Image (cartoon, rainbow, N blue to C red):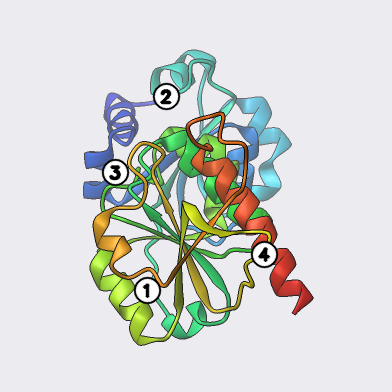
Amino acid sequence: MLTQAQKKNIKQLHDKIHRREQGYFVAEGEKVVCELLLSSLEVKSVYALNQWVEKNNNLLNKVETIVVSEKELQQISHLKTPNQVLAVAKTPHYEIDFLEIKKGVSLFLSNVNDPGNLGTIIRTADWFGVSHIFCSEHTADAFNSKVIQSAMGSLFRVKIYFVSTEEFLERCKRYEITILGADMNGTSVYSYSFKCPMVLVMGSESHGIDEVCKRYINEYVSIPGKHNAESLNVAIATGILCSEIMRSVLEQ
């Protein structure tokens, strides 16, 4: 049975300010929590229905596990339809290793503030083997419940960093990492020759890449189309670009 203090603490973690103050986040749903338990992240506690605990007992070694009722799970859940299990885990913080960044392709998200798009971008990056995503100060919180749900476990494999735009891109420049921007007026992605190391900058759909980023971008690439629509969804555009980058790099 949950105490009032436990309920209050978990519900507070649905808020960005409390997540940052406490250093923990909430993950929900069978698949997401299983992915979390299989990852290297530190899981503080699991709150689950008895049938879920019995089914997944092999994943719960040394993790505090509290069996709850459906009503209790509903009281602490952020989902409209709670799904058997909720976990509280420590928010990871990674040190930036620019020598590691120089080995491949990374993403920089310039004010991508829609949580669903951010989650899909993280999942897409995981699919294409992009291990590092750097986020500007005004990009959505990666541990927002909508991001976690749309990332579907990829959040626990891809390293996410929140950085000062200018400081990060200045250091990329110092390490001779190509900074590539996505823009409708850039060179066609189908004729551009991608070379590692590089950081691909993606901007928000409404405002594009911000002015600070533009000062550091070496070249721009675009995705050709008939332009009947105003723009491509940023998550879809990221997927197309990552696919082309992967193909180009593998052919070299």
The numbered mark, 1 or 4, whose residue comes first in the sequence reads 1
Disc number placed over residue 19 in the picture, else none: 3
Residue closest to the eye, 214 or 43:
214
Question: How far apart are the alpha carbons under marks 4 and 2?
Answer: 45 Å
Question: How far apart are the alpha carbons under marks 1 and 3?
Answer: 20 Å
> Circle 4 is placed at which residue position?
191
At a point 58% along the width and 76% down the height, the residue shown is 104
The numbered mark, 3 or 4, whose residue comes first in the sequence reads 3
The numbered mark, 4 or 2, whose residue comes first in the sequence reads 2
Residue closest to the eye, 58 or 40:
40
Residue closest to the eye, 118 or 6:
118
- In the rendering, at what x and y percent does residue 242 appear? 62, 58
Q: Are marks 4 and 2 in contact (CB under 8 Å)?
A: no
Tell which tag, 2 or 1, sits nearer the viewer.
1
The numbered mark, 1 or 3, whose residue comes first in the sequence reads 3
> Circle 2 is placed at which residue position?
78
Q: How packed is label 1: few (under 14 Cα within 10 Å), some, or many (20 or more)?
A: few
Q: How packed is label 3: few (under 14 Cα within 10 Å), some, or many (20 or more)?
A: many
Tell which tag, 1 or 3, sits nearer the viewer.
1
The numbered mark, 2 or 1, whose residue comes first in the sequence reads 2
Count of marks placed on residues: 4
Quarter of the image holding residue 192?
bottom right
Horizontal side, residue 92 vs residue 35: left or right: left
At a point 27% along the width and 47% down the height, the residue shown is 138
| Up-down relation of residue 217 to residue 223 (above or below) | below
The secondary structure type at the circle numbered 1 is loop
The secondary structure type at the circle numbered 3 is helix
| Up-down relation of residue 78 to residue 41 (above or below) | above
Question: How far apart are the alpha carbons under marks 3 and 4?
Answer: 44 Å
Q: Is residue 163 visible?
A: no
